[in-house]
Image: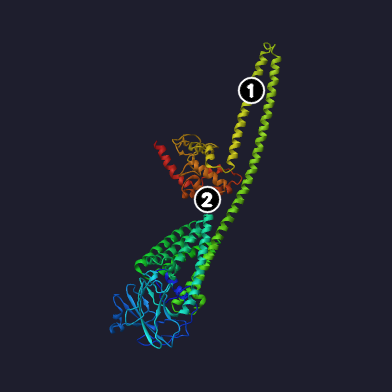
Amino acid sequence: MLRTTNSPKLSSLTYVWHWLWLSFTALLSATPSSGAPFLGSEQPLQVEASRAELFIEPHNYSVLEDPTGRLTLHDVQLPEHQARFVLGSRTATNMEHPGSAYWLRLNVLAKGPQPQHWYLELFDSHLNNIIFYPDAASEQGEVHTGADWPFTSRPYRYKNYLMRLPLTTNQVQTYYLRLQSSSKTSFLSRLRTEQGIAEHFQTEYGLLGGFYGILLIMVVYNFCLFFFTGEQTYLRYVGYVLSCSLVFLSEDGLGFQYLWPEYPWLNKVVEVASPPLLLLTFGYYARQFLDTAQRLPQYDRWLRTVIQFSVIVLLIDALWWKTDVGIWLYTLPYGMLFYAALRVWQRGFQPARFILLSHSLVAVSVLFLLLRKLGINTFTNTYTVYSMNAAFVLEVVVLSYALGSKIKTIQESTLRAQHRLVKQLRKKQQVQEQLVEQLRQNEELKDQLNSELEELVAQRTQELRQQGETIAAQNRELLQANGLLALQSAAIEKLNTDLQLDLQKAQTARVLSQEVDFGEFSQIYPDKDACLTYLADLKWAHGYHCRKCGHDNYCEGREPHSRRCTRCRYVESATAYTLLQKCKFSIVKAFYAVFLLHTHKGNYSAQELSRVLELRRATCWSFSQKVGDAIRRQATEHPEDESWTRLLLDDSGNENDESSDETATLTAGTSH
């Protein structure tokens, strides 16, 4: 599935995968024969009927660079150009100048009769222009194809380039190839018989089908999960897998063969855009999976900047610079993502270990690749050559499982929070039941009192009827009786009024003991004036004392519900030295926010609070932190007091902020 080359394209992450894709096409093929190269000319490649394929070693061909790109077959056969051919080697074989044309001269010796035809196979699917000359004496029968040509221009419908070699028994045949590429690459090829191609075709396309089948299953599976759950992380994961698929489709040539065979320009676009897209999609997927914006906010800003900068530089390098800087641009963002996963895992987020595992697998496979690139073959074997494919498949599966693990963790946290909420609701329900029972008893007492009063009135009326005849004589007694009735009526009215007030207070307490929406809450505190009135009464419930001089007398300030000391003229507003000091939004919304946060014990997300109050998330988060600190101080300093209004008088951390306001207010009051 992967191929190995000595000098792959250096424009992007394609550099790494191109090595492995070339290696994969070998599929455990026999090691090519080696021999001492001829001095000054290439050693003929000997083909025999007993072998199905042969790798073309550098000493089997010579290379001529044509910077002008104008030389013809006749020109390169002239003595002055023949002398410029250089025997192939690790450095001479590399196509270092994208604007030049490279001529390759290959000699093949057919030993004995050949029962099958032999074909020349070129591995690099991104060679822009290829001209093969089967006859060194003329240009007749030349084959013209390449990545800049439609797929139908190829002699055979295969993802690699195949050219048939006309061989003569026991004679050395010379063949010429003219290659051009828009990026740095190298020449890597082999000879194969018809049987070798057929056997390799079935195995290679079968493995490629299985590989892409796994990717397709992961894409469909996670897209369905996104459709049913709405979790954005699944959608970003699908984008990452699709971008990886584009890179592989571009590198192995299957995309050009099956998806866009008539659009060579699209092949170039995919080749340039897929590696930056891979980095971008993986970066945004990993950031959202790890929740770095919440867990590591400052580090996340740097990480996002580095990813965006790397993507831009990758595009510029692929379009204009065409250097080998692209491969190293992946080191920094991927290293930062690995460090972020390590930090998040250390802080207790267990699903982050899957990111570390998948990163480690890919890193090991890349290490094997770099060792082969440097010529260190100590660890080169079947498993290390195909380690990138295995690492990527495992990464796709592991990351898919990681998403499920994360969702499961979130669900468990949600269930625990719901369990705590149910306990709180049960406790509140018990309090409500006690309150209802108390109200019922009060209602019975009121009915009993009304009955007694009615009986007393009836008795007094009966007495008045009996004393009708003696009304004149008993006028004084009648006036006293009337006075008593008046007192009783006043007592009844006062009792009814008190009962109505008690009932209203009980209803208000019952409403405030449960979670109500903002509309219901606004009926209790309808506007700013009502909130300031309540806050002022709560603040100075035990009398007024000037914070500057300690004087007890005051007069009304210019602001509503403010008080000014009659001695030192210091003006103190109703919100000063309270939790609502310097509140930037409506005091009614602030009251409701304090109520919600107290009801949920501070466990109310800033995002939900922002939605309910229609305020910015940052404002809600800052206010939530302030209220949360007040809740914790109340739990420590006043554990017996569970009233949410107690939080309004929390003035911790406001002294320094208020000092400047007090000085300005005092100065203004004095000048006034």
Which residue is pictured at 49% across the width and 58% down the height? 235
Label for residue 463? Answer: none
Nearest the eye: 303 or 156 = 156
Q: Report the Cα–Cα distance between label 2 and label 1.
A: 57 Å
Label for residue 487? Answer: 1
Nearest the eye: 5 or 656 = 5
Q: Does residue 409 sit above or below 460 in this rendering? A: below
Nearest the eye: 516 or 220 = 220
Disc 1: CA contacts within 10 A as few (<14), some (14-19) or many (>=20): few
Which residue is pictured at 61% across the width and 27% down the height? 494
Give x and y (percent) for residue 664: 41, 42
Residue 333 appears in which quarter of the rendering? bottom left
Q: Quadrant of the C terminus?
A: top left
Q: Does residue 34 sit above or below 569 in this rendering? A: below
Residue 161 appears in which quarter of the rendering? bottom left
Disc 2: CA contacts within 10 A as few (<14), some (14-19) or many (>=20): some
Label for residue 605? Answer: 2
Which residue is pictured at 68% across the width and 15% down the height? 477
Secondary structure state at the residue bearing disc 1: helix
Q: Does residue 629 sit above or below 333 in this rendering? A: above
Label located before the other in sequence (2 or 1): 1
Give x and y (percent) for residue 80: 28, 83
| Residue type at numbered disc 2 | Ser
Does residue 310 appear left or right of residue 436 in this picture? left
The answer to whether marks 2 and 1 mark residues whose Cβ atoms lie closer than 8 Å is no
Front: mark 2 or 1: 2
Nearest the eye: 230 or 459 = 230
Give x and y (percent) for residue 555: 47, 33
Secondary structure state at the residue bearing disc 2: loop
Give x and y (percent) for residue 61: 38, 82
| Residue type at numbered disc 1 | Leu
Q: Does residue 581 sit above or below 445 in this rendering? A: below
